[in-house]
Image: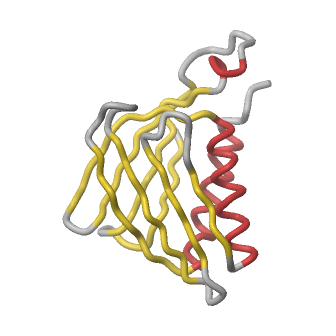
Amino acid sequence: MKSVAIGTSKSEIVTLTVLSYECAPVGEFYDDNWLRCEVSISAGAFRGKFQANFLTTEIVGLLEGLGNLHRELQGDYTFEPMEEQLVLRASCDHLGHIRITGEAMDEAGIGHKLTFRLSLDQTYLSDTLHELSDVVRAFPVRA
């Protein structure tokens, strides 16, 4: 089990915890690369936790996208996984201010939806990027 936190305080944070691969490898890309996860969100007075599945490649994309924002100090990145249970749109200005707007859905396709936003400085991404690197090492893309 590995966790990634995106945010700066207990009242503005998204935590993604990867629990395990969904199933043992069978030689089929999609079957082999689904991850069982738990997402918890604190956004102002709202708190929630739900189960979600993400592909290993989507987590790699999140690492690369946030890494680019951290390095470039400009631009946009959208984390929009296949099941769309957690969508994050991040934008960074030249001063390193990052604004993340997000949508969370407790059940893929039919669930209740929470819309939220987080504001942070790019320096807070260092820990997030280290945690994402740990997740990618612990749960690599299976060929």
Which quadrant does the C terminus fall into? Answer: top right
Residue 128 in the image, given as x and y percentages of width and height: 58, 62
Q: Identify the residue shown where x is 49% and y is 62%.
A: 6
Residue 67 relative to residue 45: left or right: right
User: Would you place residue 22 above or below residue 43 in this image?
Assistant: above
Q: Residue furthest left?
A: 45
Q: Which quadrant of the figure has residue 127?
A: bottom right
User: Would you place residue 2 above or below residue 4 in this image?
Assistant: above
Q: Identify the residue shown where x is 52% and y is 61%.
A: 89
Residue 96 in the image, given as x and y percentages of width and height: 61, 84
Q: Residue furthest right?
A: 143
Q: Nearer the viewer, residue 19 or 71?
A: 71
Q: Identify the residue shown where x is 63% and y is 70%.
A: 126
Q: Residue furthest top?
A: 26
Q: Nearer the viewer, residue 78 or 73?
A: 78
Q: Which quadrant of the figure has residue 57?
A: top right
User: Would you place residue 138 above or below residue 25 in this image?
Assistant: below
Question: Colour scheme of this structure image?
Answer: secondary structure
User: Would you place residue 50 above or below residue 33 in this image?
Assistant: below
Tally of numbered tags: 0
Q: Which quadrant of the figure has residue 91?
A: bottom right
Q: Identify the residue shown where x is 55% and y is 75%.
A: 124
Residue 108 in the image, given as x and y percentages of width and height: 39, 32
Q: Nearer the viewer, residue 21 or 70?
A: 70
